[in-house]
Amino acid sequence: GDSVTQMEGPVTLSEEAFLTINCTYTATGYPSLFWYVQYPGEGLQLLLKATKADDKGSNKGFEATYRKETTSFHLEKGSVQVSDSAVYFCALSGGRNTDKLIFGTGTRLQVFP
Amino acid sequence: ETGVTQTPRHLVMGMTNKKSLKCEQHLGHNAMYWYKQSAKKPLELMFVYSLEERVENNSVPSRFSPECPNSSHLFLHLHTLQPEDSALYLCASSQASYSGQGTDTQYFGPGTRLTVL
């Protein structure tokens, strides 16, 4: 079945460091791919998405490119801030599951000053 | 009010209590979802309603009972819960796609933090 695999956390970085959180997926068909972020004590918020191969989603300095050849959707940011500390979830929809999201387990990011 | 709202934000209940969680979406969507988020576990999809009909029930115990009276409101009725049911319960909504191209973005509420004593 469809699935999403994320790197385990926590990821611990100093402020202004470069961030990569890996995400790979398994799906049939043409899934859409998402990154959601959950700040402490809050629900999930959509961070960015891509709906077809080679699309790049971007928001708030974060980017991720839909790579069909490597079935990946890695999240990157050039310079993280303390306020980016949160849990990041990779997800897909479509494939065999056209009406629900399949989430990864989440990766906690901790940024220190 | 905009987006997806959930009430209450925090709930403490005993195992013999009956309570309900409420979710309301102001986005004009036609699909609503309940998720359970427990510490150190993946996000678990519990129920999906599309056009007010339940289309998914992921083997959730009968002590959880969903209700979707219209496309804007979703309830989760709780009775005789167990301590292991303590978790963050998240509601989401989306505009479901039937074209095989995947669901549109899901928008989440802030969640209800449930503690069962």
Image (cartoon, helix red, strand yellow):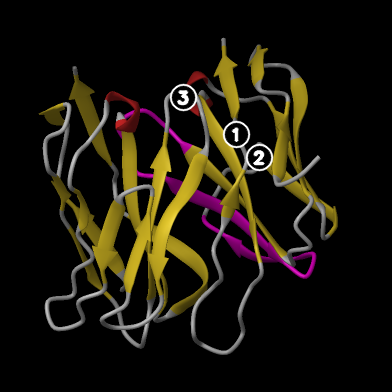
Relative to A94, say whether B11 is above or below.
above
User: Who's the residue at 56% across and 70% down the image?
Assistant: B104
Does label 2 or label 1 sit earlier along the sequence? 2
Depth check: B44 or A44 in front?
A44
In space, the residues marked 2 and 1 are separated at their CA atoms by 20 Å
Of helix, strand and loop, which one carries label 2?
strand
Relative to B39, say whether A8 is above or below.
below
Q: Chain letter of disc 2?
A: B
On-image quarter of the C terminus of chain A: top left
Q: Bounds of the magenta span?
A: B37-58
Depth check: A3 or B54 in front?
A3
User: Who's the residue at 49% across and 42% down the image?
Assistant: A44
Does label 3 or label 1 sit earlier along the sequence? 3
B99 sits to left or right of A19: right
User: Please, what is the three-letter code of the amino acid marked with disc 1?
Assistant: Pro
- In percent of width and height, residue B42 lies at 34, 44
User: Please, what is the three-letter code of the amino acid marked with disc 2?
Assistant: Phe
Can residue A102 be seen here? The reply is yes
On-image quarter of the N terminus of chain A: bottom left
Location of mark 1 (residue): B110
Depth check: A79 or B62 in front?
A79
User: Please, what is the three-letter code of the amino acid marked with disc 3?
Assistant: Glu
Front label number (2 vs 1): 1
User: Who's the residue at 18% across and 69% down the image?
Assistant: A72
B24 sits to left or right of A76: right
In space, the residues marked 3 and 1 are separated at their CA atoms by 21 Å
- In percent of width and height, residue B21 lies at 73, 33
Location of mark 3 (residue): B84
Of helix, strand and loop, which one carries label 1?
loop
Location of mark 2 (residue): B64
User: Who's the residue at 61% across and 54% down the image?
Assistant: B47
Of helix, strand and loop, which one carries label 3?
helix
